[in-house]
Image (cartoon, helix red, strand yellow):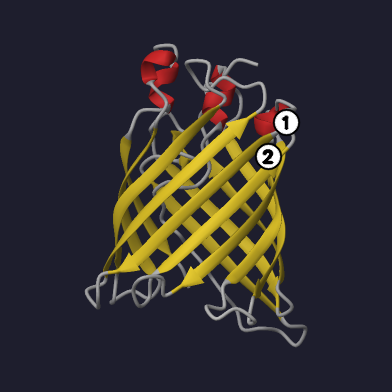
Amino acid sequence: MKFTFKALSLAVVATASSFTFADETPASPFGLSVSGTAAITSDYRYRGMTQTFNDPAVQAGFVLSHDSGLYAGVWGSNVDFGTTAHIELDPYIGFATTLDSFANKPLLDVGLWYYAYPSQSDLNWLELYGKLTFNDVLAQGASLLTAVNYTNDFLGFDTDAWYLNATYSVPFGATGFGGVAALGYTVADDYDFGSGDDNYFDWKAGVTYTFASVDGLTAELAAVGTNIDPDSTSSVDSRWVDTGAVFTLTKAF
């Protein structure tokens, strides 16, 4: 199957800039807690590609967590694919636990994420994910997130696909600044991402800042892109894969 306009537009979900709004309440007698997020980003990027024609996006989400590690939530953003889909609203469910038997005590997180577009349901698709986060990697306070994602309905096209990702974050001492770098790899059956390739790499490199005066407020400025050659796509679609700067504000509380 060719990598069509729909595929390019959908190949983009949250490495974007963001103003995040989170709210967490004390755990109830049932071991439950609720948190919320809101975000504003200069360009909503998903696995290196834009979902908003390089325009800003407002994003928000809520999650209900249990002391057992079970959680469920929903996340949403505006999108622009040049189609009737203008809102993405993704429900998800998962389980997270610390692996205490390992020296580094990494965090294991597995779940299901459903990409949903209420005004254009033929774009909907489901993905299984597994994540492992290691703390204090190479430096105090640094973290390494590794992830594996699988779907048999990639971008709603009824085809198998895998996504592998590694993200490294490190603070620069007590300055409030930090660095972030990520590398991802997508491979899909019977799919053409340009030049006849059924796979591509995406990447991100940037600087973060945590505001000491506002609890939970962070900013990120990063370069985001892919190794897809814009010349291998149509003149219209090349905007989806061009490298760009993405600014994000995030508020969590």
Q: CA distance from mark 2 to mark 1?
A: 7 Å
Does residue 11 appear anywhere in the picture? Answer: yes
**Could you tell me which residue is drawn at 68 percent across and 39 percent down?**
116
Which residue of the protein is positioned furthest toward the top in this rendering? 234
- Height in image: 120 above or below 195? below
**Could you tell me which residue is drawn at 38 percent across and 32 percent down?**
54
Q: Earlier in the sequence, mark 2 or mark 1?
A: 2
Q: Secondary structure at mark 1?
A: helix
| Tag 2: amino acid | Ala
**Could you tell me which residue is drawn at 63 percent across and 30 percent down?**
188
Q: Is residue 238 left or right of residue 33?
A: left
**Could you tell me which residue is drawn at 46 percent across and 63 percent down?**
144
Does residue 119 appear anywhere in the picture? Answer: no
Q: Secondary structure at mark 2?
A: loop
Residue 236, picture quadrant: top left
According to the image, label 1 marks what residue?
121
Q: Position of residue 232 (x, y in %)?
A: 42, 14
Camera-side residue: 138 or 235?
138
| Tag 1: amino acid | Ser
Q: Position of residue 45 (x, y in %)?
A: 45, 40
Q: Is residue 59 left or right of residue 98?
A: left
Q: Are marks 2 and 1 in contact (CB under 8 Å)?
A: yes
Quick one: label 1, few (<14), some, or many (20+) residues within 10 Å? few
Instruction: Give the label on residue 116, or none.
Output: 2
Camera-side residue: 124 or 138?
138
Instruction: Give the label on residue 99, or none.
Output: none
- Which corner quadrant holds the N terminus? top right
Camera-side residue: 37 or 115?
115
Residue 71, picture quadrant: bottom right
Q: Position of residue 166 (x, y in %)?
A: 48, 53
- Height in image: 245 above or below 40? above
